[in-house]
Amino acid sequence: MMKKNKFIQLGLVVLSGLMMTIASAQTVKIGFMGTYSGPGAAQGDQLDKGVKLFIKLNGDKLPPGVKVEIITRDDTGPNPDVAKRVAQELIVREKVNYLTGFVWSPNMAAIGPLTTEAKVPYVSMNAAAARVMINAPYMARTSFTLWQSAYPLGQWAAKKYKKAYTAVSDFAPGHEAEEGFIKGFKEGGGEILGSVRIPVANPDFTPFIQKIKDVKPDVIFGFNPAGKAATGMMKAYSDLGLAKAGIKFIGTGDIVTDEELQGMGDVALGVTTVHHYSANSNRASNRAFVAAYKKEFGENLEPGFMAVGAWDAMEAIFYTIREQNGKIDPDKTMELLKKYKSTTSPRGEFSIDPETRDVINPEYLREVRKVNGKLANVEIETLSTGIKDPMKEFDKKK
């Protein structure tokens, strides 16, 4: 009888311990919105790979008893209505603690009011339009804004060229890239001969690039949403012989994104850009990231800046989970994000601007060169170790 009682007592102790473990277990839900279908799937693939690689290598770096669940949705491309619907599903049905993802700024803009009403923090992995977050206090970004690269590129270009023509995709990031470059170029004494905005969906670059060739500027400033659009724009530049006509091609890093670069051919050689990330960079943190990426996805695949944006967003989210021991409070999360600094990012050190919740990024002047027989974005100068979004800095002075 005594043995039986001891057995029962032992069982109760084990059961009690098990129940305590269950009670202390905490699952944090992260709603990830990417592009898995349509023409933008190539860009979406970069975000997806960045998230998967981070979770594989860091998914267990959480407090005891805390785990994360990634719930994925397809936004189908630049489609604000779909973005709003999937965000609502994630907030209402899945009751996520965080939202993240999005290649496309129109999608990010569409869910701003939802994040405010529901108080669900959103961390942008790529969407780069600067104005989107002005009235969205539960949004932050670890990616970039177009002004951060376009404005210093305009300043640099004004020292080398007199006449420029701008060619950008016709949506908010393109408009902001155009504004930033023109301001920097004109401040340096340059002249803008003309500007053209090209449809985002199914663009045919040929008529636009031909028109620019006929005007004969010294240089084209370009922006497109990377992926296959980058290769298409470069192909039109090559086919129409602008390089042979002496018209240089410069732009934000989107026009020669690392994962598309090998498909562009030698016409990309010498293209100059300003950007916050290059797969070719020799930073120790980047070498480790690129090696892990290639080991996971294939030796011939290069990570682009969108994969890095996804990686860094997940690192920032994990930081806020650890700081709260898995018990997520949205307001506390936003305060933590405003103070976030990374010293281990593949791009180099960066932080979040506590005032705007934008990223404060390093920016590098880069040139496409051949390295070991392959095209690469080679960083030739660090223009800034930490640039705030220039558009918002100028707005303060008005």
Image (cartoon, grey):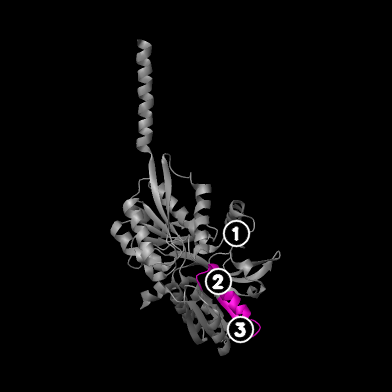
Can I make out residue 355 in this image? no
Determine the image quadrant of residue 211: bottom right
Q: What whole-number distance in Å separates the C-alpha atoms at marks 1 and 2?
A: 25 Å
Examine the structure image and report whether residue 5 is included in the region drawn in magenta: no
Please tell me how crowded label 3 is: few (under 14), some (14-19), or many (20+) other residues with Cα within 10 Å: some
Report the side of 248 relative to 327 (left or right).
right
Of residue 83 and residue 293, the one placed in the foreground of this image is 83
> Are circles 3 and 2 on residues that touch, CB within 8 Å?
no
Where does residue 62 sit, x and y in percent of width and height?
45, 44
Judged by depth in the image, the label closer to the viewer, 3 or 2, is: 2
Q: Which residue sits at x=36%, y=32%?
A: 20
Which circle marks residue 337 in the picture? none
Where does residue 159 sit, x and y in percent of width and height?
57, 82
Disc 3 marks a residue whose amino acid type is Ile
* First along the sequence among labels 1 and 2: 2
- The residue that mark 3 highlights is 247
Where does residue 56 sit, x and y in percent of width and height?
52, 48
> Are circles 1 and 2 on residues that touch, CB within 8 Å?
no
Q: Which residue sits at x=46%, y=54%?
A: 314
Report the side of 128 relative to 298 (left or right).
left
Can I make out residue 37 in this image? yes
